[in-house]
Amino acid sequence: MATPVPFTFAGALAGARGVLPAALSSAAFGLAFGALAQKVGLSFAETVLMSAVVFAGSAQYPAILAWSFPPAILPLALTTLAINARHLLFGAAVRPWLAPLPPGRAYLSLFFLSDSNWLAAMRAWNDGETDRAIILGGGIAMCLGWTSGSAAGHL
């Protein structure tokens, strides 16, 4: 029987602490995004939902600048895909670390993968860390920073 790999709450907290400065910076950028989203006519709920589900500031800014009613979904989706293609490389880099996890935990961690928590996780992995929840905890912190900043900016 294979030994289980660590995926703990303590690891998630360590991941969140590791990206705290970046998460605060993400909140500041989210403020500007939220204000812009409000200006182009997105509701508060739409702004928060977009930030939480898309969770890609580098793609959300160009998307919001090209926003129309009704939105042109295909061009927006293709733009988002092109801008975030780097996440394919991030995912490939963490694959060996996440591969032993149950699929649900691995995919949840990948959903929250961002530049900052990817870098923090790679550093931790290279330093010998084995708790895979570092990726998830850091990603949740980044998402909370971005989404709460977007919400505050919209208000």
Image (cartoon, rainbow, N blue to C red):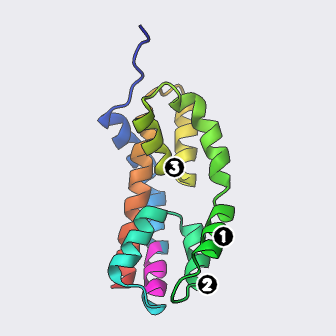
The answer to whether the residues at label 1 and label 3 have Cβ atoms under 8 Å apart is no
Contact, mark 1 vs mark 2 (Cβ under 8 Å): yes
Q: Residue at x 62, y 51 (%)?
A: 87
> Badge 3: how crowded within 10 Å, few (<14), some, or many (20+)?
many
Q: Which mark is residue 46?
A: none
x, y percent for residue 101: 45, 28
Identify residue type, mark 2: Ala
Image position, residue 72 (x, y; %): 59, 80
Q: Which residue is mark 1?
A: 79
Mark 1 neighbour class, 10 Å CA radius: few under 14, some 14 to 19, many 20 or more: some
| Residue 36 forms part of the magenta stretch | yes
Q: Of residues 75 and 49, which is closer to you in this image?
A: 75
> Could you say where residue 142 lies in the image, as x and y percent from the top left?
44, 57
Looking at marks 1 and 2 on the same chain, the residue that comes earlier in the sequence is marked by 2
Q: Nearer the viewer, residue 49 or 6?
A: 49
Q: CA distance from mark 1 to mark 2?
A: 10 Å
Q: Give left or right: position of 46 versus 59.
A: left
Instruction: Report the residue at 62% width, 72% height from top.
Output: 74
The amino acid sitting under disc 1 is Thr
